[in-house]
Image (spheres, rainbow, N blue to C red):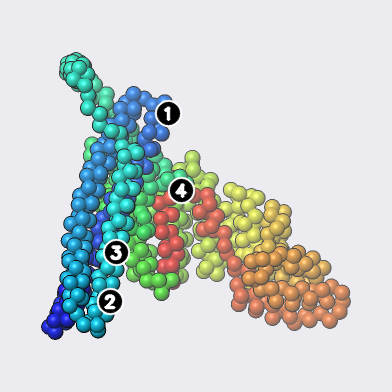
């Protein structure tokens, strides 16, 4: 800036110098921004190391085996080495800060000095102009000095954080070195004598630890990322010694996805997705393409990559999938439910298959429309025919029947949905939500002339709603739907009572529902009860409204009920994105 103004007083061209000064300032700020980003990245690595060391020290305070104690101490030494290396990196960044800003500040101070000398011989008008230029130069110097101080303060804070945590390196006294040397020589001799047995024992213990950790069930609660990193590390070590271990590759992929950070930069996200895909692909290849879980996870990551990419478009809250679920997961579906003419045996599902099957059916139902809903029913029927693992049969079968009822309802096969819900009810006889949906399935039949009272559907609907209220007296939907059913059945006294109960609800239940419709028919039911002006033709009008508004069709339990019981944090990562992809 200073050189530009001095030149202007000499009457020379300033345009090129002005552009050069702006370019210098822009380059300086870009360098400082890059320096800040490097400091922030390094600070994150340091925080991660310190957090890990804290966890290791906490574990050391508890009783552990001698082998585990040695492993923990070795890991702490490794972290201390990392922290010392980071400290040197901070020194390098500090030198970069000085090399970036000091020459720039010195040059601006030189400009200020030249302007002050020029002002001595200038006329009054020029002195005023030069004074303004000197003030601008001073402001630039102050700005750059403040930037230097802010960055230096951040560097000092990070260094103090390392100093407070890293174990200092204390030089050993000469006599102590000699004693340690003697001990080490003795120890080496002992190890040499028993090296084979010791190594064998250590390897077996390490192998056992890796197997236990790799197969450890990850929970939704707690520090999921750290736990997942531990599992991932153990699984990768296990695959080094057992490259054909399919479960280890699958668990490595599952743990890898659980280290996902939504706020990471795009490059880090892409690397994580590629690595996770790679682990699942290894499982597919090692199984010869015969493991449906590996096939599902592998293709699931294609969906995951597509959906996380589309989610960046904030203007589009919902989006179309590039590929139907039946096509995306074709290979896995063919194993879970082989075609009858394929000659292949039915796949016997176990606990680890449960959420995959439920997610597959959910994808088919919501992404593929009517054809997918039929495919979901076929898949679930195939599982039912295969006689699942008896140790996990009850819970699994209940959730399969619930998913099947969901697909049948969307196909408007309400009588079939009712039968599926009855099967689910066998495993949870007092579950008010299943009872409530059974009432809804039969109630929906009453809205069509051809099925208005098929197999006593109206009476059954009323009975199931009443049973739901016995289990949960404060169920708003049960009271509301029961009100309309009593009215349609001509039971005006019961309808008035149910309407009154419904209108006692407040908040989101009643206010966001069809409040005006409920009040209208509450008054009509009251008039009919009292023998007054009972508008009988209102019943057909009500049926039309109930059908158009989907009052009885308000299916809400299936996926919600399943998610509460079947916990799998793998599917919890960016879970909402999979609901945006639907027909």
Residue 14 as seen in the image, left or right of residue 397 = left
Given contact means CB atoms under 8 Å apart, are the residues at marks 3 and 4 in contact? no
Query: 501 or 493: nearer the eye?
Result: 501
Q: Which residue is mark 3?
A: 142
The answer to whether the residues at label 1 and label 2 have Cβ atoms under 8 Å apart is no
Q: Secondary structure at mark 2?
A: helix
Q: Earlier in the sequence, mark 1 or mark 2?
A: 1
Look at mark 2 in the image and give the residue it sits on. 132
Q: Which mark is residue 8?
A: none
Instruction: Write down the quadrant of residue 114 in the picture.
Output: bottom left
In front: mark 3 or mark 4?
A: 3
Q: Decide if residue 27 is in sight here.
A: no
Q: Position of residue 1 (x, y in %)?
A: 21, 73
SS type, badge 1: loop
Q: Nearer the viewer, residue 383 or 214?
A: 214
> Is 279 rendered above or below residue 234?
below
The tag earlier along the polypeptide, 4 or 1, is 1
Closest to the observer, 104 or 321: 104
Instruction: Of the two numbered discs 2 and 3 on the same chain, state the one appearing first in sequence.
Output: 2
Is residue 169 toward the left or the right of residue 59 in the image? left
Can you identify the residue that label 1 sits on?
62
């Amino acid at each position: 800036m200073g050189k530009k103004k001095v030149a202007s007083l000499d009457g020379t061209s300033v345009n090129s110098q002005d552009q050069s000064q702006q370019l210098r300032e822009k380059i300086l700020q870009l360098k400082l921004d890059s320096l800040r980003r490097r400091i922030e990245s390094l600070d994150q690595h340091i925080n991660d190391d310190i957090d890990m060391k804290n966890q290791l020290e906490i574990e050391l305070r508890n009783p552990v085996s001698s082998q585990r104690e040695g492993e923990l101490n070795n890991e702490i030494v490794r972290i201390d080495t990392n922290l010392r290396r980071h400290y040197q990196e901070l020194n390098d960044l500090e030198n970069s800060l000085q090399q970036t800003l000091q020459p720039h500040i010195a040059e601006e101070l030189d400009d200020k000095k030249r302007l002050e000398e020029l002002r001595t011989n200038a006329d009054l008008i020029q002195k005023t102009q030069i004074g303004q230029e000197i003030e601008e130069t001073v402001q630039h110097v102050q700005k750059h000095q403040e930037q230097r101080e802010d960055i230096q303060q951040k560097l000092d804070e990070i260094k103090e954080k390392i100093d407070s945590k890293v174990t200092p390196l204390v030089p050993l006294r000469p006599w102590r070195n000699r004693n340690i040397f003697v001990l080490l020589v003795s120890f080496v001799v002992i190890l040499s004598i028993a090296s084979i047995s010791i190594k064998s024992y250590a390897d077996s213990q390490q192998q056992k630890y890796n197997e236990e950790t790799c197969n450890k069930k990850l929970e939704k609660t707690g520090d999921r990322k750290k736990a997942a990193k531990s599992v991932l590390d153990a699984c990768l070590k296990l695959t080094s010694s057992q490259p054909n271990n399919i479960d280890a590759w699958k668990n490595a992929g599952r743990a890898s996805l659980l280290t996902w950070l939504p706020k990471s930069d795009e490059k880090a996200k892409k690397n994580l997705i590629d690595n996770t895909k790679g682990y699942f692909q290894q499982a597919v290849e090692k199984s010869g393409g015969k493991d449906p879980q590996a096939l599902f996870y592998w293709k699931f990551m294609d969906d995951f990559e597509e959906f996380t990419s589309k989610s960046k478009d904030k203007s589009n809250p919902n989006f179309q999938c590039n590929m139907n679920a039946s096509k995306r997961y074709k290979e896995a579906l063919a194993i879970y439910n082989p075609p009858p003419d394929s000659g292949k045996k039915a796949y016997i599902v176990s606990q680890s298959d449960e959420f995959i099957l439920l997610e597959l059916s959910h994808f088919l139902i919501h992404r593929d429309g009517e054809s997918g809903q039929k495919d979901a029913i076929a898949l679930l029927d195939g599982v039912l025919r295969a006689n699942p693992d008896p140790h996990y049969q009850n819970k699994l079968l209940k959730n399969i029947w619930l998913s099947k009822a969901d697909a049948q309802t969307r196909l408007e096969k309400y009588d079939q949905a009712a039968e599926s819900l009855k099967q689910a009810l066998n495993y949870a006889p007092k579950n008010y939500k299943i009872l409530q949906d059974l009432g809804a399935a039969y109630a929906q039949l009453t809205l069509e002339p051809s099925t208005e009272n098929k197999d006593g559907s109206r009476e059954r609907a009323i009975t199931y709603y009443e049973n739901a209220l016995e289990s949960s007296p404060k169920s708003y939907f049960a009271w509301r739907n029961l009100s309309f059913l009593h009215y349609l059945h001509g039971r005006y006294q019961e309808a008035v009572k149910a309407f009154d109960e419904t209108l006692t609800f407040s908040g989101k239940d009643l206010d966001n529902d069809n409040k005006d419709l409920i009040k209208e028919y509450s008054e009509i039911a009251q008039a009919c009860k009292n023998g007054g002006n009972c508008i009988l033709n209102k019943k057909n009008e009500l049926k039309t409204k109930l059908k158009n508004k989907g009052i009885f069709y308000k299916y809400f339990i299936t996926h919600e009920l399943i998610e509460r019981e079947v916990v799998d944090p793998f599917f919890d990562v960016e879970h909402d994105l999979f609901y945006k992809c639907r027909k």
